[in-house]
Image (spheres, helix red, strand yellow):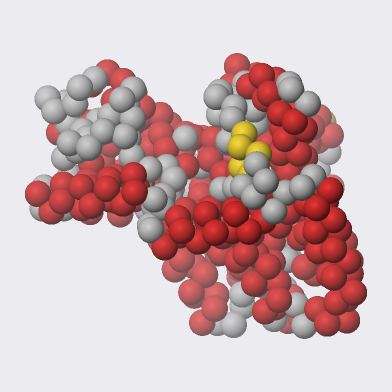
Amino acid sequence: MQNKLISEIQYYSFAGLPVKKSILNIIIYLTFFLFIVIPNALRIFKLPFLFLLLVFAISNTKLPKRQLTFFFLLILVTYIFILIGKNKTVDFQTASVQAFIVYVIFPIIWIVIGNFIFKIYDYKVIVKKYIQIGLWGCLSVYIAYAAFIMGYGDFVKILVERPNALITGNVFSITLNVFGSLLVIAAAIGHVPKLYSQRRFIVLLVVYVLTAAISGRSAFILAAAIGVFFFVIYDKRLLKNSFFIFLGFAILAAILFYFNLELMGSIEHFIEELLSGGGDERTKQTKMLTEGILDTYFLGAGHGVGIKYIRNYEFPWRYENLIFSIIYRTGIIGLLIYAYPFIYSLLSFLRLKKKRMVNMYDKFFFWGVTVFILVNFTNPYLESFEFQIPYFFTYCYFFNRSKNLVNENINTSEIRS
């Protein structure tokens, strides 16, 4: 278990000033509510909260030397590949600023804050709050659909810059950034059914599955399917509550029937995209990125450098297949440095598995981030600092878990969950 003295702390330092824990709790909840539910929007409101949280984190935690070494490597590798791409990029200033923001500044910010979060809260609290905030994200999807149906689609600009919805007899989808946040939770939630009563958990699962179904987003639908799969595999009490599962999906079917919406069109579209590697556009850019990687001998063309195929005219070095794009721009060395948080998480998870010490929180964070990484082969979520939370927080979780493992009293019933 984590340090039980955590709950006894009533005040935290804010640049030397004592602040009540209740106030800090509100700041943390609001910050992550804004970043998870409304990603890539209202940044003028979100960033001040993030700054406050960063000051709290710096005032109450010390950075381990290993993380300082990683930060140094982030800066060094990013700077080197910015210089390599200097004479080849169409907009050196924009490309270099973006590279430092995405690959240096915010990774450091999220890790510093992540260390603090996992220091002051129990894992159970963090996971439950994460899932709860995700429910607010699900609600925002239904509100957005209702706004379009009632003719108030312009109000959805609060959630996404260019709102769009397709609602026909057999296909329905909507453009919302929140899907990038929700797919991580949907993929991981199947590992933590024991955090809730069986019936409550099934309700949560149905809400996430329904939200994925009406999103029209292939990655989100796949993530939700993975979440359901893990739930069925790991929860041996499933059959005892089969009535409530049937009732949940019956309600889902009734809602779809009431609004005259059919799932088959969306499911067929999802299968087509999955089999085609994400569609023609993604297939073309992946092929040309592969050629570019081979032409540069896996050494990297430099930050801000694109291939002949332009997907984004505003930022012509950005592509939906982010993993191949990183390899093309920074080579294998850059990929290894930027992938270090996931590599660390993977090795930590495998060590715990080898020792038979894996618990449901390990599974939640590891499989959630694994699905998130896979999604980045077709969606460049990691190039937006707002979607980096699960990536770096998973690293912070396993770093904290490894650090405290010696002092933990292992609960064998939890390990086998």
Q: Position of residue 315 (x, y in %)?
A: 32, 26
In screen coordinates, is 332 left or right of 210? Answer: left
Name the residue located 59 percent from the left edge and 27 percent from the top edge: 163
Residue at the front extreme of this rendering: 169
The part of the image, by quadrant, that contains residue 275 is bottom left
Q: Position of residue 254 (x, y in %)?
A: 85, 56
Name the residue located 66 percent from the left edge and 19 percent from the top edge: 154
Vertical relation: 243 (above or below) 377:
below
Vertical relation: 202 (above or below) 85:
below
Is residue 397 in sight in this rendering?
Answer: no
Q: Position of residue 260 (x, y in %)?
A: 77, 47
Task: Give the position of the C terminus as an image quadrant.
Answer: bottom right
Q: Position of residue 331 (x, y in %)?
A: 21, 49
Q: Closer to the camera, 401 or 309?
A: 309
Name the residue located 71 percent from the left edge and 39 percent from the top edge: 141
Q: Closer to the camera, 215 or 115?
A: 215
In screen coordinates, is 312 left or right of 202? Answer: left
Name the residue located 66 percent from the left edge and 39 percent from the top edge: 167
